[in-house]
Image (tube, rainbow, N blue to C red):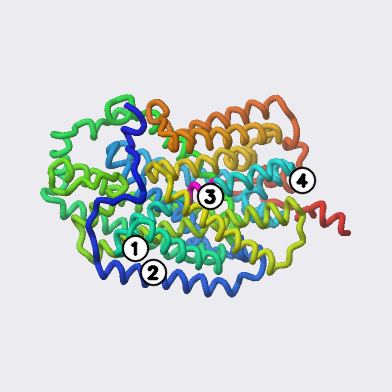
Amino acid sequence: MTASSLAPLQTWGGEIGVEYYSQTAVLFLVIFSLLMIGIGIVASRYQTNQEEYFAAGRRGGLIVIALSMFASIQSGWGMIGVTGTGSLLGPEYLMLVAAGTPFGFVLSYWLLGRKMRMLGELRNAMTAPDAMYYRFEDERVRLLGIASVILGSMGYLAAQYAALGIIGALILPVNFFEALLIGLVIVGFYTVVGGMLAAIWSDAIQGAMMVMGAILTAYFIITNYPGGTDAMVSTISTQQPEFFNFTLLGMDGIAGIGLLLSVIVIQLTVAGQPHATTKFYMIKDVSLLKWGALITAFSYMLTALYWVAAPFVRAGILSGEIPDPGNPDAALPLALVEFAPDIVVAFVLTSVIAAIMSTSNGFLNMSSAAVVHDYFVEHLDRDLTDGQEVLYGRVTTIAILAAAGLLAATFPGLIFVLGAAGWAIFAAVIFPCVAIAYNWKGATAEGALWGSLTGLGLTLVLAYGVEYLSLSLPMGILGGQLAMVIGYVVFVAVSLVTSTNTYEDLDPDIQEIMDLGRTRGGSVSSRRIPDERASDDD
């Protein structure tokens, strides 16, 4: 069995296989869109310099940051993509994702929370490439970080926009491409004008909507399915018993092992996602980080209730209760339309749109920061005015939005596969160069360069190449996650035999950050070390 038979490919612009129209849903979507636009306009009043535009002025409260962090991951990829893939692979896959991803959040807080917050305070760091450069003091490492953030953002955003087109076409009387365009205009507007402040404000609202939507989804699907849970289990057990196999090998015992291992790799590398690093820069009180980890993980677990739709849709299709949409990513909206009242369907579909937008605005902002702050200001040493920094950030945001929208409209595979590719591009570079490097004194610049180049290059080939060429890897392995692991091995191996920019070579404040306790204690006493440009100016 090939990967494509486990997760069949689809055409984004085709019919999604669900008939639905509701004036209530249209009204909810319009109200929500106007709310997001209003947030962008209000936040735009604070966008006076790059720290405000890219780091929200470092005034994020605990709950806002915690909700924002989970909302940026449990998005169109998680809600639509995981539900669709789960309807093919069964509850074992869903349970693995539900249990492992919160652990990834906690691991991310533990590895990076205090260290990145202190790095932001001492070095005015705003981006993941900032963290990479200050750890290795090598411009080549910064450039790799820039490339990773830009390329990864386009892949990850494309997964969101593919889901946006599907849900938008369901709510509005338009096709996939028209819905995609409308959604891009809305999210583009409030992100461009409002910067990261609009992102974290809107994320908090969207995160709360996502949690409520998940609870409503699970309740109505379970209670309104004919015969309830017993009938669902009986139907699947009779007609497709392998769906319930708990072998940790997937479906028929061997074909899915690569996919399940790939999912575990994804969960362990949450700390390799740039939004984790940048959100930690923004929190006001570092002592509250331990509570943030619990809020983020618990909120994510609540939104896993969306995935309840997967087995019920499978049972409904097998019994003939509901039509087969021919598109796995239609599983969640199909379940809602079949089993929930109209007002609930309208609210939940709007919550899905909220999830997509919450991820989109954060990643758009981070990728524009990689261009303006990391490349022009830091790497090229351009002396931009505050107004120029914000203007260039907005122009870059529009360009990346358009590129990601084009990828969403042309990618031949499932949303989950597209999101996994974007995730891999981030994690191939940022996880070793930040999450590992700030916790391992032996990491070297050579290891960072060779490992990241290997992981990034292989990810582009294996994650995207196999999809566009209609090829497959054995046992359902996701190409990007395989590339990540190979890159990590190279990173460690090269670091063990080289010695540039190890712990002993670093500035005292960076050494203290690396020594900082992960949960408490070990406060940093150093004052910020002026960079070379400031010293030269003196």
Say if residue 357 shows up in the picture. Answer: yes
Residue 258 among those drawn in magenta: no
The residue mark sitting in front, 3 or 4, is 3
Three-letter amino acid code of the residue under disc 1: Thr
Reading the image, the residue beneath label 3 is: 153
- Measuring from the top left, give residue 177's x and y in whole percent: 38, 57
Reading the image, the residue beneath label 4 is: 508
Please state if 411 lies on the left or on the right of 342 as rendered: right
With respect to residue 282, does 415 lie above or below?
above
Question: Toward the viewer: 352 or 17?
Answer: 17
Residue at 47 percent across and 52 percent down: it is 406
| Residue 135: quadrant of the picture | top right
> CB of mark 2 within 8 Å of CB of mark 1?
yes
The residue mark sitting in front, 4 or 1, is 1
Q: Earlier in the sequence, mark 3 or mark 1?
A: 3
What residue range appears in magenta? Answer: 152-157
Residue at 36 percent across and 58 percent down: it is 352
Reading the image, the residue beneath label 1 is: 350
- Measuring from the top left, give residue 254's x and y in whole percent: 33, 24
Q: Earlier in the sequence, mark 3 or mark 4?
A: 3
The CA span between labels 3 and 4 is: 33 Å
With respect to residue 332, does 195 lie above or below?
below
Q: Earlier in the sequence, mark 4 or mark 1?
A: 1
What's the magenta bit mostly, secondary-structure-wise? helix
* Mark 4 Cα shell of 10 Å, populated few (<14), some (14-19), many (≥20): some
Three-letter amino acid code of the residue under disc 3: Ser
> CB of mark 2 within 8 Å of CB of mark 4?
no
Which numbered marker is on residue 32? 2
